[in-house]
Image (cartoon, rainbow, N blue to C red):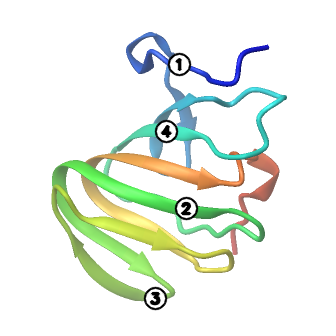
């Protein structure tokens, strides 16, 4: 097994997620470290949190808001957001973002109130 991975995000099919649709790169069983997602946020994401994962959101396109523990912050291209475990969050608006979950994304670590 090589010491690297390469992903063609254009070839990865999108899957539904609480935010809209995500293309998930590096989401393989032998990679517990981190994944990278391109996410199309459709309008208003569903508020959720993670008990283990930290997430980094990086806005590529669109404008909107990020709700973090009940407080709203503006989003526009080139904005980055670091979300620690336990922070209830959601994106609001129509956006395209890169999301980096650390450790690697795990659906079992998505929690809703």
Give the alpha-carbon distance from disc 2 to disc 3, as whole Å: 17 Å
* Residue at the image point whose x is 46% and y is 49% from the top: 99
Q: Secondary structure at mark 2?
A: strand
> Among all residues in the image, which is located at the extreme top?
11
Observer-side mark, 1 or 2, equals 1
Task: Report the residue marked by disc 1.
Answer: 6
Image quadrant where residue 103 sits: bottom right
Work out whether residue 88 or residue 6 is closer to the camera in this orientation and state it: 6
* Residue at the image point whose x is 45% and y is 10% from the top: 11
Q: Residues within 10 Å of mark 1 (few under 14, many from 20)?
A: few
> Among all residues in the image, which is located at the extreme front?
3
* Residue at the image point whose x is 41% and y is 40% from the top: 39
Observer-side mark, 1 or 3, equals 1
Residue 63 drawn above or below residue 49: above
Observer-side mark, 2 or 3, equals 2
Q: Residues within 10 Å of mark 4 (few under 14, many from 20)?
A: many
Question: Residue 55 shows which numbered tag?
Answer: 2
Give the alpha-carbon distance from disc 4 to disc 2, as whole Å: 10 Å
Task: Report the residue marked by disc 4.
Answer: 37
Rendered location of residue 75, percent (x, y): 22, 67
Q: Secondary structure at mark 4?
A: strand
Rendered location of residue 16, percent (x, y): 55, 35
Question: Residue 70 shows which numbered tag?
Answer: 3
- Side (left or right) of 77 relative to 2: left
Question: Residue 76 shows which numbered tag?
Answer: none
């Amino acid at each position: 097994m090589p010491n690297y991975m390469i992903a063609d995000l254009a070839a990865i099919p999108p899957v539904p997620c609480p935010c809209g649709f995500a293309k998930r790169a590096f989401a393989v069983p032998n990679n517990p470290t981190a994944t990278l997602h391109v996410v199309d946020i459709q309008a208003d994401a569903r508020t959720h949190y993670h008990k283990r994962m930290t997430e980094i959101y990086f806005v590529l396109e669109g404008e909107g808001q990020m709700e973090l523990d009940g407080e709203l912050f503006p989003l526009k291209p080139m904005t980055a957001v670091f979300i620690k475990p336990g922070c209830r969050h959601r994106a609001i608006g129509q956006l395209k973002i890169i999301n980096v979950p650390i450790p690697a994304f795990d659906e079992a670590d998505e929690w809703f109130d």
